[in-house]
Each structure stands twice: as structure tokens, then as C-alpha cells.
Image (cartoon, helix red, strand yellow):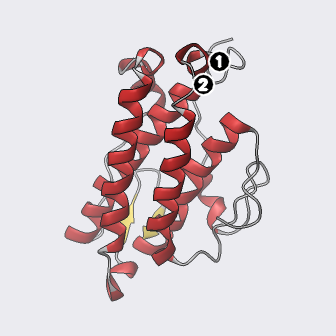
Amino acid sequence: MPIVPDDKDWTWVLSRPCPECGVDVTGLSPESVAPLVRANAAEWVTILGRPADELRRRPRDDRWSPLEYACHVRDVFALYDHRLLLMLEEDDPLYPNWDQDATAVEDAYLGQDPLTVAGQLGLAAEDLAVAFEQVEGSQWGRPGRRSDGAVFTVASFARYMVHDPVHHLYDVTGQAAGTTA
């Protein structure tokens, strides 16, 4: 069975804990996002140190391998950095669409070099962490929108973003995050 594209609306994580991965971002202070991004990236870099054949092995035909998830997280960090910049520089921007499943195929996630991905993921995470650290005061309330109608402030966007890489660590390790990010 091929990988089924994820078309779920995950914005509900802003109002309740994720029953799968265990992360609860509902009360997360936006200022705590930068250290969480760095900590998550460090875990991914550790995972990417495993043997390449293990990283490329899909647990099931319809699930990504650890390497594919790491590539996705790298790209999520870069995408959120771009979207955060849009929110800070434009008035109520509409984010360009991104098809994560098409990107995985087009960029051949499964064939990428794990050490290269580790370096890229670390850099993308650091860029995003620095961008969040530079947000001040009323900037946390600046809005942005997805094409599906979801509306965020920089603060809710920060909390929403935390769930994605944490959830994917759960996808790879099977270890729930606990009750808070």
C-alpha cells in the first residue's frame, strides 16, 4: 500500500493535547519555542546518526522511513521560517500552498544522504529558532492565513509548529512526548 497523503487539519492541537504523541501546546509560551526547536533538532540529528539502511527502512509500506520524516522536518523548519517572515513583514499574509507529499517524492527523500540531511536540518532549525527569538511584544499578535482558511497569530503559529516535529519524533521512536512540549 502506498503512502496516503495527509490531508488532516491539525489546528485542533491548539486547543487540546495530541492523543497520539502526547504533546500539549495549549499553554506553551511562544517565547519557549526557540529552545524547543533546537532540542527537537538535536534529537533528529542523533537519529540520523543511525546506519543508513535502518534510516531508509519503512516500518510499513504506508509509513515514511526515519530518513523521510527527518527530511520532512527539515523542510517544515524552513517553511515555517519563511511563513514567520511573511507574518512579520506583511499585513495578514496568505501563505503559499505546500504539498508535503509531493515534495517528498520530488525531492526523493528516501535517497538523500542522512549526514547531509542532519546538517541541513540543524541549520534550518537554528534559522527558525533565531527568527522566533527576534519576535517582540505586539509582533506575537500579527496574523497570517493558510489557503484552507486557518488563521494564526505569530503566537498560535509558534505553538502549532511545535507539534509537527515532536509528533514526527513519536512516529519514528514510538515514545510519547508527555503532557507538555
Q: Residue furthest bottom?
A: 137
Q: Earlier in the sequence, mark 2 or mark 1?
A: 1
Q: Tell me the residue at 36%/21% (across/down).
A: 107
Instruction: Give SS at disc 2.
Output: loop
Residue type at numbered disc 1: Arg
Q: In this view, does 145 lie above or below 48?
A: below
Q: Is residue 78 visible?
A: no
Q: Is residue 64 visible?
A: yes
Residue 75 place in picture, x, y as percent = 39, 40
Residue 90 place in picture, x, y as percent = 21, 68
Q: Do the residues labelled 2 and 1 touch (CB within 8 Å)?
A: yes
Q: Which mark is residue 58?
A: 1
Residue tagged 2: 64
Tell which of 47 and 127 is nearer to you: 47
Q: Tell me the residue at 39%/52% (across/down).
A: 125
Please identify the quarter of the rendering in which residue 168 is found: top right
Which quarter shows the C terminus? bottom right
Q: Tell me the residue at 49%/40% (across/down).
A: 45
